[in-house]
Image (spheres, helix red, strand yellow):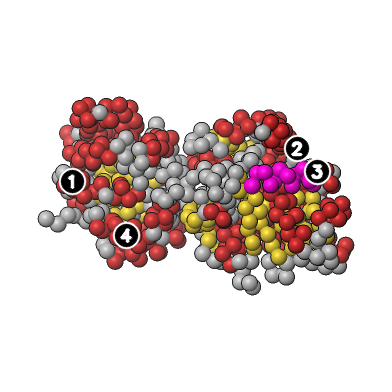
Amino acid sequence: MTRQTVREAAESASYPLFIPFIMAGDPNKETTIELALTMQEAGAHILELGIPYSDPLADGPVLQRSALRALKHGMSLTEAIELIPEMRKKGLTIPVIIFSYYNPVLRMGIETFIEKLTENEADGVLIPDLPLEESEELSTLTKKVNLANISLVAPTSSTRLEKIAAQAEGFLYCVSSLGVTGTREEFPPEAYAFIEEVKASSEVPVAVGFGISTPEQVKRLQGSADGVIIGSAIMKKVEGLQAELEHEAKRRDALQSIQQYVEGLLAVPSSHQQ
Amino acid sequence: MSKVYPDDKGRYGAFGGKFVPETLMFALEELEQAFEQAWNDEAFMNDYHHTLEEFAGRPTPLTYAERLTEKLGGAKIYLKREDLLHTGAHKLNNAVGQALLAKRMGKKKIVAETGAGQHGVATATVCARMGLECKVFMGEEDMRRQSLNVFRMELLGAEVVPALSGSKTLKDATNEAIRYWVSNVEDTFYLIGSVVGPHPYPKVVRNFQRIIGDETKQQLQDIEQSLPDAAVACVGGGSNAIGMFYPFLEDDVELYGAEAAGMGVETSHHAATISKGTKGVIHGSLTYLIQDENGQIIEPYSISAGLDYPGIGPEHSHLAESGRVQYEAVTDDEAMEALKELTRTEGIFPAIETAHALHLAFAQAKKMSKDQILVICASGRGDKDVNTIKESLEREVQS
């Protein structure tokens, strides 16, 4: 069976294209593998597997804490990539994107990194602190092996938007509003116009991330974006269920409640469509 | 050596660049443009120099250390007295320059990071003078250790925000300042304290600090009708060092940087980025840094709060790799000995950061001949360190 590419998965999804972010190793490997399957079960089309990092500049408190917990448990870039085949063995079929800050990748060596990704059946890569101007070395290599190198655009991208959109692969990650990751009460009013501008410039599907934590937000984005990326809201749930997730006997119930929570976020009632 | 750095990608050889989230890229482009215009604008430069003269106290003296020279028996030693600058260290040169730039760009809010508090105090000072709103991130642990500087900043009207993440020191204060900037990039100017961070910051800070070396060159010309044979400075992020070195890069002058070896480079308690670090990205710049085998950044250690940064300015990484500057690591103990020596021999009480440069300079001076000249950047005064020094000397007596 051939897996869908990131772009195929993004294009074939009906709204909302759902891309969850989970932090590898929070609180342990077993949970991460199960959580990936839980997300697929909850309707995920693509999975972002996050690599914990000591100095995550683009992240708010929830993902900072999550990374620290994962690091304390010894998670690393190598180990996280090697979780993917274990997820596949248990039935994960959706494309997986490795989400890592640049320093762990550089430390491993870009070529080794790419080799490991292909060996372990990853489908894409997203480096939040590697803007277009610095990404040539990586993207030359990802192109050779058909890995999607996911780009981000932000409300401040301004004149940069077209340049970034023109070379976007897989899907375009649209940062909803200024700031770090984590829940926002609601988006500023100008966010929607920006998202529509991004959508108009992009040939690949547009997924909105940073701050999505309510079904209302997901519903409100219908029509302007193709999908949503949800990370902090999920990892906040994981944070609240640490004790349960660490106990094998209680893990299943905890994952069940996370699944229900995520399904609740995504419930766009078809009967109420405007 | 005539190649101009940084190049148009913000690189110093293999180092530097802009490794930041997309949200900040536009702000960096905007800053670069504004800086290049300002730097070439006579009115702006007049304003910068005028403020440094009438407010900050420039030019700072170049002091001949006669007794120390005799005692060491080698090169003639001169001290560039940045310790006499308003607020007590070279940091103000850069804070004045960037704050004027912020005003020119129409930004009324300033955010900064600080470790020991020297850059925070310098920033709060210029903000008070120029009527700018000032927010300073400082690690919670540093706030406890440097409570007097917290008070000074607050007295100057700044808001000091504790950085609660990570190890709660300079690295984390920098993370928090950048995160705050990401959220408020449209109306806030990030006033970085050293030659670190994404392009164009290392260049902006270098240019505002090069006045140290420019003045030194002129002053030595007036006194000795000569260039120095060697120049020495301490390096944390490396702003006083680059300020001293940059005007001499093309000259026949040996350059030495002293980084912090803490308890020793063979221990895990040091901040010796060049001696013990590996290449990586920290705070938006590709440079040497202290990290583990998985690319996680390791918290550095030095008795000097101004040197315990896990990275180093990218231009220093380049100067180390090209061999133009020699970097050597100096331990806590060596620095404290040098500090006592300068205080007692010359009546100048330096900051512990500066004391690292002193140790390295004394060793070099001894190897040089009496007709040679060595200049040391006395980057700051020791008043802020009185408690640390007292504790350290008391420990020494007990052990």
- Front residue of B254/A209: it is B254
Residue located 16% across and 44% down the image = A90
Kindly indicate whether the residue at mark 2 contacts the one at mark 4 (C-beta within 8 angstroms). Answer: no
- Image mark 3: chain: B
**Secondary structure mostly taken by the magenta-highlighted segment of the chain:** helix
Could you tell me the amino acid type at mark 4? Ile
Mark drawn on residue A92: 1
Residue located 75% across and 54% down the image = B362
The image shows residue A175 at horizontal and vertical percentages of 39, 46
The image shows residue B144 at horizontal and vertical percentages of 61, 30
Mark 4 — residue?
Answer: A114
What is the spatial separation of the Cα atoms under label 4 and label 2, in whole angstroms? 52 Å
Q: Are marks 3 and 4 on the same chain?
A: no
A57 relative to B278, above or below: above
In the picture, which quadrant includes the N terminus of chain A?
Answer: bottom left
Label 2, secondary structure: give it: helix
Could you tell me the amino acid type at mark 2? Asp
Bounds of the magenta segment: B331-342
- Image mark 2: chain: B
Mark 3 — residue?
Answer: B343
Label 4, secondary structure: give it: helix
Q: Residue furthest left?
A: A1
Which of the two marks, 3 or 4, is nearer to us in this view?
A: 3
Q: Earlier in the sequence, mark 1 or mark 4?
A: 1
What is the spatial separation of the Cα atoms under label 1 and label 4, in whole angstroms? 21 Å
Mark 2 — residue?
Answer: B383
Asked whether, in this view, residue A218 is left or right of residue B19, the answer is left
What is the spatial separation of the Cα atoms under label 2 and label 3, in whole angstroms? 12 Å
Could you tell me the amino acid type at mark 1? Leu
Kindly indicate whether the residue at mark 3 contacts the one at mark 2 (C-beta within 8 angstroms). Answer: no
